[in-house]
Protein backbone atom coordinates (compact mmCIF):
# COMPACT_ATOMS: atom_id res chain seq x y z
CA UNK A 1 0.00 0.00 0.00
CA UNK A 2 2.84 2.36 0.92
CA UNK A 3 4.54 1.61 -2.42
CA UNK A 4 1.33 2.44 -4.29
CA UNK A 5 0.97 5.66 -2.32
CA UNK A 6 4.57 6.61 -3.12
CA UNK A 7 3.90 5.98 -6.83
CA UNK A 8 0.78 8.13 -6.71
CA UNK A 9 2.65 10.94 -4.96
CA UNK A 10 5.48 10.70 -7.48
CA UNK A 11 3.04 10.84 -10.39
CA UNK A 12 1.30 13.83 -8.81
CA UNK A 13 4.63 15.62 -8.35
CA UNK A 14 5.52 15.05 -12.01
CA UNK A 15 2.11 16.38 -13.04
CA UNK A 16 2.54 19.52 -10.93
CA UNK A 17 6.00 20.16 -12.43
CA UNK A 18 4.63 19.73 -15.94
CA UNK A 19 1.76 22.10 -15.24
CA UNK A 20 4.09 24.62 -13.64
CA UNK A 21 6.31 24.44 -16.69
CA UNK A 22 3.30 25.13 -18.87
CA UNK A 23 2.49 28.32 -16.98
CA UNK A 24 3.90 31.55 -18.38
CA UNK A 25 6.99 32.88 -16.66
CA UNK A 26 7.28 36.64 -16.52
CA UNK A 27 9.72 39.21 -15.25
CA UNK A 28 8.94 41.61 -12.42
CA UNK A 29 5.33 42.81 -12.54
CA UNK A 30 6.15 46.43 -11.86
CA UNK A 31 7.38 48.62 -14.67
CA UNK A 32 8.23 52.29 -14.98
CA UNK A 33 4.77 53.19 -16.22
CA UNK A 34 5.52 56.90 -15.92
CA UNK A 35 8.45 56.63 -18.34
CA UNK A 36 6.32 54.54 -20.70
CA UNK A 37 3.53 57.15 -20.52
CA UNK A 38 5.92 59.94 -21.47
CA UNK A 39 7.18 57.95 -24.42
CA UNK A 40 3.74 56.79 -25.57
CA UNK A 41 2.70 60.44 -25.99
CA UNK A 42 6.00 61.51 -27.57
CA UNK A 43 5.37 58.95 -30.33
CA UNK A 44 2.61 61.13 -31.79
CA UNK A 45 5.09 63.93 -32.52
CA UNK A 46 6.99 61.51 -34.77
CA UNK A 47 3.76 60.85 -36.70
CA UNK A 48 2.91 64.47 -37.36
CA UNK A 49 2.21 65.77 -40.83
CA UNK A 50 2.18 69.45 -41.70
CA UNK A 51 4.30 72.37 -40.49
CA UNK A 52 6.00 71.35 -37.26
CA UNK A 53 5.94 73.87 -34.39
CA UNK A 54 8.96 75.23 -32.49
CA UNK A 55 7.95 72.99 -29.58
CA UNK A 56 8.51 69.84 -31.68
CA UNK A 57 10.56 67.40 -29.59
CA UNK A 58 11.16 64.64 -32.16
CA UNK A 59 14.08 66.31 -33.90
CA UNK A 60 14.64 63.78 -36.69
CA UNK A 61 11.34 64.79 -38.28
CA UNK A 62 10.77 67.91 -40.40
CA UNK A 63 7.69 69.60 -41.85
CA UNK A 64 5.96 67.62 -44.62
CA UNK A 65 2.80 67.49 -46.70
CA UNK A 66 2.65 71.29 -46.86
CA UNK A 67 0.58 71.34 -50.04
CA UNK A 68 -1.96 68.74 -48.87
CA UNK A 69 -5.42 69.69 -50.10
CA UNK A 70 -4.21 72.23 -52.65
CA UNK A 71 -5.52 70.09 -55.52
CA UNK A 72 -9.09 70.69 -54.28
CA UNK A 73 -8.38 74.19 -52.91
CA UNK A 74 -8.79 73.10 -49.28
CA UNK A 75 -6.16 73.36 -46.54
CA UNK A 76 -5.61 69.76 -45.44
CA UNK A 77 -2.19 70.22 -43.91
CA UNK A 78 -1.52 68.74 -40.49
CA UNK A 79 -2.92 65.61 -38.90
CA UNK A 80 -1.11 62.31 -38.48
CA UNK A 81 0.34 59.62 -40.67
CA UNK A 82 -1.41 56.50 -39.42
CA UNK A 83 1.52 54.12 -39.24
CA UNK A 84 4.73 53.53 -41.20
CA UNK A 85 3.68 55.13 -44.48
CA UNK A 86 2.95 58.68 -45.63
CA UNK A 87 -0.80 58.55 -46.25
CA UNK A 88 -3.31 60.37 -44.07
CA UNK A 89 -6.12 57.83 -43.68
CA UNK A 90 -9.06 59.66 -42.10
CA UNK A 91 -10.81 56.65 -40.59
CA UNK A 92 -8.01 55.46 -38.27
CA UNK A 93 -6.86 59.07 -37.74
CA UNK A 94 -10.28 60.00 -36.35
CA UNK A 95 -10.44 56.88 -34.15
CA UNK A 96 -6.96 57.58 -32.80
CA UNK A 97 -8.07 61.13 -31.99
CA UNK A 98 -11.18 59.86 -30.20
CA UNK A 99 -9.16 57.41 -28.10
CA UNK A 100 -6.50 59.99 -27.24
CA UNK A 101 -9.26 62.31 -26.05
CA UNK A 102 -10.94 59.52 -24.06
CA UNK A 103 -7.59 58.70 -22.44
CA UNK A 104 -7.30 62.33 -21.30
CA UNK A 105 -10.92 62.51 -20.15
CA UNK A 106 -10.73 59.41 -17.96
CA UNK A 107 -7.14 59.56 -16.74
CA UNK A 108 -5.83 63.06 -17.53
CA UNK A 109 -6.13 64.02 -13.88
CA UNK A 110 -3.44 61.44 -13.16
CA UNK A 111 -1.02 62.57 -15.89
CA UNK A 112 0.45 65.60 -14.09
CA UNK A 113 3.34 66.94 -16.19
CA UNK A 114 2.30 64.87 -19.21
CA UNK A 115 -1.22 66.30 -19.39
CA UNK A 116 -0.25 69.25 -21.57
CA UNK A 117 1.66 67.01 -23.98
CA UNK A 118 -1.39 64.73 -24.19
CA UNK A 119 -3.65 67.73 -24.88
CA UNK A 120 -1.25 68.88 -27.58
CA UNK A 121 -1.51 65.44 -29.21
CA UNK A 122 -5.32 65.62 -29.11
CA UNK A 123 -5.31 69.13 -30.57
CA UNK A 124 -3.01 68.18 -33.44
CA UNK A 125 -5.65 65.67 -34.49
CA UNK A 126 -8.72 67.82 -33.85
CA UNK A 127 -7.23 70.83 -35.68
CA UNK A 128 -6.89 68.64 -38.75
CA UNK A 129 -10.39 67.20 -38.42
CA UNK A 130 -11.81 70.73 -38.33
CA UNK A 131 -10.08 71.36 -41.68
CA UNK A 132 -11.36 68.06 -43.06
CA UNK A 133 -14.95 69.02 -42.20
CA UNK A 134 -14.83 72.70 -43.18
CA UNK A 135 -17.41 72.25 -45.96
CA UNK A 136 -20.98 71.24 -44.98
CA UNK A 137 -22.05 67.72 -45.97
CA UNK A 138 -18.47 66.83 -46.84
CA UNK A 139 -15.68 65.04 -44.99
CA UNK A 140 -12.25 64.79 -46.59
CA UNK A 141 -11.28 61.28 -45.58
CA UNK A 142 -7.88 60.63 -47.13
CA UNK A 143 -4.86 62.48 -48.48
CA UNK A 144 -2.48 60.43 -50.60
CA UNK A 145 -2.74 57.69 -53.19
CA UNK A 146 -2.11 54.65 -50.99
CA UNK A 147 -1.13 52.34 -53.83
CA UNK A 148 1.50 54.70 -55.17
CA UNK A 149 2.69 55.65 -51.72
CA UNK A 150 3.23 52.00 -50.82
CA UNK A 151 5.16 51.47 -54.05
CA UNK A 152 7.78 53.86 -52.66
CA UNK A 153 9.92 53.86 -49.55
CA UNK A 154 10.68 57.49 -48.85
CA UNK A 155 10.71 60.02 -46.05
CA UNK A 156 7.57 62.13 -45.66
CA UNK A 157 9.78 65.19 -46.14
CA UNK A 158 10.72 63.86 -49.61
CA UNK A 159 7.48 62.32 -50.78
CA UNK A 160 6.59 63.06 -54.38
CA UNK A 161 3.76 60.56 -54.83
CA UNK A 162 0.29 61.98 -55.67
CA UNK A 163 -1.39 63.68 -52.70
CA UNK A 164 -4.81 62.82 -54.09
CA UNK A 165 -7.72 63.90 -51.89
CA UNK A 166 -10.74 61.66 -51.29
CA UNK A 167 -14.01 62.70 -49.71
CA UNK A 168 -17.44 61.50 -48.65
CA UNK A 169 -20.53 63.58 -49.46
CA UNK A 170 -24.24 62.93 -50.20
CA UNK A 171 -23.41 61.16 -53.47
CA UNK A 172 -20.54 59.17 -51.93
CA UNK A 173 -21.77 58.49 -48.39
CA UNK A 174 -19.54 57.39 -45.57
CA UNK A 175 -21.51 57.21 -42.33
CA UNK A 176 -18.72 55.20 -40.70
CA UNK A 177 -15.86 57.66 -41.21
CA UNK A 178 -18.13 60.69 -40.78
CA UNK A 179 -19.63 59.47 -37.49
CA UNK A 180 -16.16 58.54 -36.21
CA UNK A 181 -15.01 62.05 -37.11
CA UNK A 182 -17.99 63.46 -35.20
CA UNK A 183 -17.05 61.28 -32.21
CA UNK A 184 -13.47 62.58 -32.29
CA UNK A 185 -14.60 66.21 -32.45
CA UNK A 186 -17.10 65.70 -29.61
CA UNK A 187 -14.56 63.92 -27.42
CA UNK A 188 -11.95 66.62 -28.06
CA UNK A 189 -14.49 69.30 -27.15
CA UNK A 190 -14.66 67.79 -23.65
CA UNK A 191 -10.87 67.83 -23.33
CA UNK A 192 -10.79 71.60 -23.95
CA UNK A 193 -14.04 72.57 -22.24
CA UNK A 194 -12.27 74.29 -19.35
CA UNK A 195 -8.88 75.18 -20.82
CA UNK A 196 -10.17 76.66 -24.10
CA UNK A 197 -13.97 77.12 -24.05
CA UNK A 198 -14.14 78.87 -27.42
CA UNK A 199 -12.26 76.06 -29.16
CA UNK A 200 -14.40 73.50 -27.34
CA UNK A 201 -17.60 75.17 -28.55
CA UNK A 202 -16.31 75.17 -32.11
CA UNK A 203 -15.49 71.47 -31.90
CA UNK A 204 -18.87 70.41 -30.52
CA UNK A 205 -20.77 72.53 -33.05
CA UNK A 206 -18.84 70.88 -35.86
CA UNK A 207 -19.40 67.43 -34.30
CA UNK A 208 -23.17 67.98 -34.37
CA UNK A 209 -23.12 69.02 -38.02
CA UNK A 210 -20.93 66.12 -39.11
CA UNK A 211 -23.02 63.58 -37.19
CA UNK A 212 -26.20 64.88 -38.82
CA UNK A 213 -24.58 64.38 -42.22
CA UNK A 214 -23.44 60.85 -41.26
CA UNK A 215 -26.91 59.87 -40.11
CA UNK A 216 -28.80 61.44 -43.00
CA UNK A 217 -26.65 60.06 -45.83
CA UNK A 218 -26.07 56.46 -44.84
CA UNK A 219 -23.56 54.08 -46.33
CA UNK A 220 -20.08 52.63 -45.81
CA UNK A 221 -17.32 54.77 -47.24
CA UNK A 222 -15.49 51.81 -48.71
CA UNK A 223 -18.46 51.01 -50.97
CA UNK A 224 -17.62 53.76 -53.46
CA UNK A 225 -14.02 54.42 -52.39
CA UNK A 226 -12.95 50.78 -52.19
CA UNK A 227 -10.16 51.05 -54.75
CA UNK A 228 -8.56 53.85 -52.68
CA UNK A 229 -9.17 52.87 -49.04
CA UNK A 230 -9.07 49.07 -49.35
CA UNK A 231 -7.45 46.81 -48.35
CA UNK A 232 -5.87 49.28 -45.94
CA UNK A 233 -8.88 50.58 -44.01
CA UNK A 234 -12.01 49.00 -45.45
CA UNK A 235 -15.09 49.35 -43.29
CA UNK A 236 -15.71 45.68 -42.56
CA UNK A 237 -18.16 46.14 -39.67
CA UNK A 238 -20.50 48.54 -41.47
CA UNK A 239 -21.50 51.99 -40.27
CA UNK A 240 -24.02 51.13 -37.55
CA UNK A 241 -21.38 50.89 -34.82
CA UNK A 242 -20.02 54.36 -35.66
CA UNK A 243 -23.50 55.92 -35.57
CA UNK A 244 -24.04 54.50 -32.08
CA UNK A 245 -20.53 55.52 -31.01
CA UNK A 246 -20.90 59.03 -32.45
CA UNK A 247 -24.28 59.51 -30.77
CA UNK A 248 -22.82 58.29 -27.48
CA UNK A 249 -20.04 60.88 -27.64
CA UNK A 250 -22.44 63.68 -28.57
CA UNK A 251 -24.68 62.63 -25.69
CA UNK A 252 -21.71 62.90 -23.33
CA UNK A 253 -20.50 66.19 -24.81
CA UNK A 254 -23.85 67.98 -25.03
CA UNK A 255 -26.13 66.29 -22.47
CA UNK A 256 -28.84 67.04 -25.03
CA UNK A 257 -31.98 64.88 -24.83
CA UNK A 258 -31.83 64.72 -28.63
CA UNK A 259 -28.96 62.22 -28.52
CA UNK A 260 -30.40 60.22 -25.63
CA UNK A 261 -33.62 59.84 -27.62
CA UNK A 262 -31.61 58.85 -30.70
CA UNK A 263 -29.79 56.15 -28.75
CA UNK A 264 -32.99 54.81 -27.17
CA UNK A 265 -34.78 54.74 -30.51
CA UNK A 266 -31.94 53.36 -32.64
CA UNK A 267 -29.67 51.46 -30.27
CA UNK A 268 -30.87 47.97 -31.13
CA UNK A 269 -30.99 48.71 -34.85
CA UNK A 270 -27.41 49.93 -34.63
CA UNK A 271 -26.21 46.71 -32.97
CA UNK A 272 -26.10 47.63 -29.29
CA UNK A 273 -26.50 43.99 -28.25
CA UNK A 274 -24.39 42.32 -30.93
CA UNK A 275 -21.80 39.95 -29.52
CA UNK A 276 -18.78 41.39 -31.29
CA UNK A 277 -15.91 41.54 -28.84
CA UNK A 278 -13.19 43.20 -30.89
CA UNK A 279 -12.72 46.94 -30.33
CA UNK A 280 -10.57 48.92 -32.74
CA UNK A 281 -10.52 51.39 -35.62
CA UNK A 282 -13.17 49.42 -37.53
CA UNK A 283 -15.64 48.19 -34.90
CA UNK A 284 -16.78 50.54 -32.11
CA UNK A 285 -19.66 48.59 -30.56
CA UNK A 286 -17.73 47.55 -27.43
CA UNK A 287 -16.48 51.09 -26.84
CA UNK A 288 -19.97 52.52 -27.26
CA UNK A 289 -21.34 50.04 -24.71
CA UNK A 290 -18.71 50.98 -22.13
CA UNK A 291 -19.17 54.70 -22.78
CA UNK A 292 -22.96 54.50 -22.47
CA UNK A 293 -22.75 52.34 -19.36
CA UNK A 294 -21.18 55.32 -17.58
CA UNK A 295 -24.39 57.27 -18.08
CA UNK A 296 -26.25 54.57 -16.15
CA UNK A 297 -23.60 53.60 -13.59
CA UNK A 298 -22.25 57.04 -12.70
CA UNK A 299 -24.85 59.53 -13.87
CA UNK A 300 -27.87 57.31 -13.08
CA UNK A 301 -29.53 57.69 -16.50
CA UNK A 302 -32.04 54.88 -16.10
CA UNK A 303 -32.94 54.86 -19.80
CA UNK A 304 -29.49 53.42 -20.54
CA UNK A 305 -29.58 50.58 -17.99
CA UNK A 306 -29.36 47.94 -20.71
CA UNK A 307 -25.87 49.16 -21.60
CA UNK A 308 -24.58 47.91 -18.26
CA UNK A 309 -25.58 44.39 -19.36
CA UNK A 310 -24.11 44.95 -22.83
CA UNK A 311 -20.87 46.22 -21.30
CA UNK A 312 -20.76 43.30 -18.86
CA UNK A 313 -21.06 40.87 -21.75
CA UNK A 314 -18.02 42.36 -23.47
CA UNK A 315 -15.96 42.59 -20.30
CA UNK A 316 -16.81 39.02 -19.24
CA UNK A 317 -15.57 37.73 -22.60
CA UNK A 318 -12.04 38.67 -21.48
CA UNK A 319 -12.02 37.26 -17.94
CA UNK A 320 -10.08 33.95 -17.90
CA UNK A 321 -11.51 31.09 -15.89
CA UNK A 322 -15.13 32.20 -16.14
CA UNK A 323 -17.88 30.42 -18.13
CA UNK A 324 -18.14 33.49 -20.35
CA UNK A 325 -14.48 33.73 -21.39
CA UNK A 326 -14.19 33.87 -25.18
CA UNK A 327 -10.72 35.36 -25.51
CA UNK A 328 -7.65 33.54 -26.72
CA UNK A 329 -4.47 34.02 -24.68
CA UNK A 330 -1.08 32.82 -25.80
CA UNK A 331 1.02 30.47 -23.69
CA UNK A 332 2.84 33.57 -22.46
CA UNK A 333 -0.44 35.19 -21.38
CA UNK A 334 -0.84 37.63 -24.29
CA UNK A 335 -4.37 38.49 -25.41
CA UNK A 336 -4.51 37.39 -29.03
CA UNK A 337 -7.16 38.45 -31.54
CA UNK A 338 -5.58 38.68 -35.00
CA UNK A 339 -2.14 38.15 -36.48
CA UNK A 340 -2.04 41.59 -38.14
CA UNK A 341 -1.20 44.32 -35.62
CA UNK A 342 -2.60 42.38 -32.68
CA UNK A 343 -1.24 44.86 -30.15
CA UNK A 344 -3.97 47.34 -31.09
CA UNK A 345 -6.53 45.00 -29.51
CA UNK A 346 -4.36 44.54 -26.44
CA UNK A 347 -4.15 48.27 -25.79
CA UNK A 348 -7.80 49.00 -26.62
CA UNK A 349 -9.05 46.12 -24.46
CA UNK A 350 -6.79 47.13 -21.57
CA UNK A 351 -8.12 50.66 -21.75
CA UNK A 352 -11.74 49.49 -21.69
CA UNK A 353 -11.06 47.16 -18.75
CA UNK A 354 -9.52 49.99 -16.71
CA UNK A 355 -12.20 52.48 -17.71
CA UNK A 356 -15.04 50.11 -16.86
CA UNK A 357 -13.38 49.29 -13.55
CA UNK A 358 -13.38 53.03 -12.80
CA UNK A 359 -17.12 53.28 -13.52
CA UNK A 360 -17.85 50.18 -11.41
CA UNK A 361 -15.92 51.57 -8.43
CA UNK A 362 -17.83 54.84 -8.70
CA UNK A 363 -21.15 52.96 -8.71
CA UNK A 364 -19.99 50.38 -6.09
CA UNK A 365 -20.83 47.57 -8.50
CA UNK A 366 -19.25 44.34 -9.69
CA UNK A 367 -19.74 42.19 -12.79
CA UNK A 368 -21.35 38.75 -12.83
CA UNK A 369 -19.66 36.56 -15.43
CA UNK A 370 -21.70 33.38 -15.72
CA UNK A 371 -22.42 33.47 -12.01
CA UNK A 372 -18.84 34.33 -11.07
CA UNK A 373 -18.52 37.70 -9.31
CA UNK A 374 -15.74 39.74 -10.90
CA UNK A 375 -14.49 42.82 -9.07
CA UNK A 376 -13.03 46.02 -10.53
CA UNK A 377 -9.72 44.94 -9.00
CA UNK A 378 -9.78 41.76 -11.07
CA UNK A 379 -10.38 43.76 -14.26
CA UNK A 380 -7.48 46.04 -13.39
CA UNK A 381 -5.22 43.05 -12.81
CA UNK A 382 -6.07 41.63 -16.24
CA UNK A 383 -5.30 44.98 -17.89
CA UNK A 384 -2.07 45.40 -15.93
CA UNK A 385 -0.88 41.97 -17.00
CA UNK A 386 -1.41 42.86 -20.65
CA UNK A 387 0.42 46.16 -20.33
CA UNK A 388 3.24 44.45 -18.42
CA UNK A 389 3.53 41.92 -21.24
CA UNK A 390 3.78 44.77 -23.74
CA UNK A 391 6.51 46.44 -21.66
CA UNK A 392 8.69 43.34 -21.38
CA UNK A 393 7.17 40.79 -18.98
CA UNK A 394 6.91 38.16 -21.70
CA UNK A 395 8.71 35.00 -22.84
CA UNK A 396 11.12 36.98 -25.05
CA UNK A 397 11.90 39.51 -22.35
CA UNK A 398 11.29 42.18 -24.98
CA UNK A 399 9.55 45.52 -24.65
CA UNK A 400 7.30 46.14 -27.63
CA UNK A 401 7.58 49.88 -27.05
CA UNK A 402 10.57 51.37 -28.84
CA UNK A 403 12.96 53.13 -26.49
CA UNK A 404 11.52 51.56 -23.34
CA UNK A 405 13.58 48.96 -21.49
CA UNK A 406 16.88 47.35 -22.45
CA UNK A 407 15.52 45.23 -25.31
CA UNK A 408 13.03 46.55 -27.84
CA UNK A 409 12.35 46.41 -31.63
CA UNK A 410 15.14 48.00 -33.67
CA UNK A 411 13.83 47.47 -37.22
CA UNK A 412 10.46 49.19 -37.37
CA UNK A 413 8.42 49.01 -40.55
CA UNK A 414 8.41 52.81 -40.71
CA UNK A 415 9.72 54.93 -43.56
CA UNK A 416 10.81 58.03 -41.66
CA UNK A 417 12.45 56.03 -38.87
CA UNK A 418 14.28 53.64 -41.20
CA UNK A 419 15.87 56.25 -43.46
CA UNK A 420 18.49 58.87 -42.51
CA UNK A 421 16.96 62.09 -41.20
CA UNK A 422 17.08 65.27 -43.26
CA UNK A 423 19.70 66.61 -40.85
CA UNK A 424 21.89 63.56 -41.42
CA UNK A 425 21.22 63.34 -45.18
CA UNK A 426 20.02 66.69 -46.60
CA UNK A 427 19.81 65.37 -50.15
CA UNK A 428 16.57 63.85 -51.41
CA UNK A 429 16.14 60.07 -51.12
CA UNK A 430 14.02 58.99 -54.07
CA UNK A 431 11.09 56.60 -54.27
CA UNK A 432 12.99 53.45 -55.20
CA UNK A 433 16.30 54.52 -53.66
CA UNK A 434 14.73 54.28 -50.21
CA UNK A 435 14.13 50.54 -50.50
CA UNK A 436 17.73 50.01 -49.43
CA UNK A 437 16.47 51.19 -46.04
CA UNK A 438 13.56 48.75 -46.05
CA UNK A 439 15.77 45.74 -46.76
CA UNK A 440 18.78 46.80 -44.69
CA UNK A 441 19.72 44.50 -41.85
CA UNK A 442 20.82 47.44 -39.70
CA UNK A 443 18.76 49.03 -36.95
CA UNK A 444 16.65 52.05 -37.86
CA UNK A 445 18.84 55.18 -37.73
CA UNK A 446 16.09 57.20 -36.03
CA UNK A 447 14.80 55.69 -32.79
CA UNK A 448 11.04 56.29 -32.85
CA UNK A 449 10.69 56.55 -29.09
CA UNK A 450 7.32 55.42 -27.76
CA UNK A 451 6.24 53.58 -30.91
CA UNK A 452 4.44 50.33 -30.07
CA UNK A 453 4.70 47.70 -32.80
CA UNK A 454 2.11 45.15 -33.92
CA UNK A 455 3.70 42.69 -31.51
CA UNK A 456 4.50 38.99 -31.30
CA UNK A 457 2.74 36.11 -33.00
CA UNK A 458 0.48 33.54 -31.35
CA UNK A 459 3.57 31.68 -30.15
CA UNK A 460 4.94 34.75 -28.34
CA UNK A 461 7.71 35.09 -30.95
CA UNK A 462 8.83 38.34 -32.56
CA UNK A 463 11.40 38.24 -35.40
CA UNK A 464 12.09 42.03 -35.53
CA UNK A 465 12.13 42.22 -39.34
CA UNK A 466 11.39 45.51 -41.07
CA UNK A 467 9.55 43.87 -43.96
CA UNK A 468 7.18 42.12 -41.53
CA UNK A 469 4.57 44.89 -41.29
CA UNK A 470 2.05 42.69 -39.44
CA UNK A 471 4.32 42.57 -36.40
CA UNK A 472 6.86 45.39 -36.84
CA UNK A 473 4.71 48.37 -37.84
CA UNK A 474 3.60 50.91 -35.22
CA UNK A 475 0.32 52.82 -35.50
CA UNK A 476 -1.44 55.75 -33.84
CA UNK A 477 -4.40 53.55 -32.88
CA UNK A 478 -2.11 51.20 -30.94
CA UNK A 479 -0.75 54.04 -28.81
CA UNK A 480 -3.88 56.16 -28.31
CA UNK A 481 -5.68 53.90 -25.79
CA UNK A 482 -2.38 52.92 -24.19
CA UNK A 483 -1.87 56.53 -23.08
CA UNK A 484 -4.84 56.29 -20.73
CA UNK A 485 -3.92 52.84 -19.45
CA UNK A 486 -0.36 53.91 -18.64
CA UNK A 487 -1.58 57.04 -16.84
CA UNK A 488 -3.75 54.92 -14.57
CA UNK A 489 -1.01 52.35 -13.92
CA UNK A 490 1.60 55.03 -13.21
CA UNK A 491 -0.74 56.76 -10.78
CA UNK A 492 -1.89 53.58 -9.03
CA UNK A 493 1.75 52.49 -8.63
CA UNK A 494 2.68 55.75 -6.95
CA UNK A 495 4.84 56.90 -9.88
CA UNK A 496 2.70 59.97 -10.62
Image (cartoon, rainbow, N blue to C red):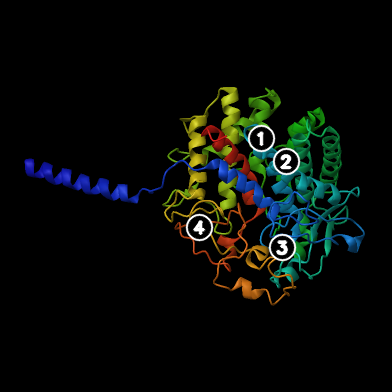
Of the two numbered discs 4 and 2 in the rendering, the one whose residue sits closer to the viewer: 2
Could you tell me which secondary element the residue under label 4 belongs to? Answer: loop
Q: Nearer the viewer, residue 33 or 315?
A: 33
Residue 395 picture location, percent across and down: 42, 54
- Image marks 1 and 3: residues in contact by CB distance under 8 Å: no
Q: CA distance from mark 3 to mark 4?
A: 25 Å
* N-term-proximal mark, 4 vs 2: 2
Residue 263 picture location, percent across and down: 74, 34
Q: Nearer the viewer, residue 231 or 478?
A: 478
Q: From this viewpoint, is residue 395 visible?
A: yes
- The quadrant in which residue 228 appears is bottom right
User: What is the residue that sits farthest to the bottom in this orientation?
Assistant: 433
Few, some or many C-alpha atoms within 10 Å of disc 1 (few <14, some 14-19, many ≥20)?
many
Could you tell me which secondary element the residue under label 2 belongs to? Answer: helix
Q: CA distance from mark 2 to mark 3?
A: 31 Å
* N-term-proximal mark, 4 vs 1: 1
From the image, tell me which residue sits under label 1: 108
* N-term-proximal mark, 1 vs 3: 1
Could you tell me which secondary element the residue under label 1 belongs to? Answer: helix
From the image, tell me which residue sits under label 2: 119
Label ID, residue 364? none
Q: CA distance from mark 4 to mark 1?
A: 30 Å
414 shown above or below 314: below
- Image marks 2 and 1: residues in contact by CB distance under 8 Å: yes
Could you tell me which secondary element the residue under label 3 belongs to? Answer: loop
Label ID, residue 230? 3
Of the two numbered discs 3 and 4 in the rendering, the one whose residue sits closer to the viewer: 4
- Image marks 3 and 4: residues in contact by CB distance under 8 Å: no
Amino acid sequence: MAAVLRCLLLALAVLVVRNAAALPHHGPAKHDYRDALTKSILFFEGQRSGRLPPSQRVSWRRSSGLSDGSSVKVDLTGGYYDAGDNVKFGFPLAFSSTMLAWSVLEFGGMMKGELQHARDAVRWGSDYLLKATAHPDTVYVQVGDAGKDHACWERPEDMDTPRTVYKVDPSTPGSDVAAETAAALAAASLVFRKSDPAYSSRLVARAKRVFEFADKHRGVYSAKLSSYVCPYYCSYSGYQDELLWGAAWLHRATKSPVYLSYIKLNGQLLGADEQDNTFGWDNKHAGARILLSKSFLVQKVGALQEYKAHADSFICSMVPGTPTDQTTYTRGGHLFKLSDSNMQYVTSSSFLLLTYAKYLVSAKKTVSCGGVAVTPQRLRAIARRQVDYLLGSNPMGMSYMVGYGAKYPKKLHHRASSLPSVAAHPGKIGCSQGFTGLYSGAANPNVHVGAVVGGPNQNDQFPDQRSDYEHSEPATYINAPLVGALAYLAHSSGQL
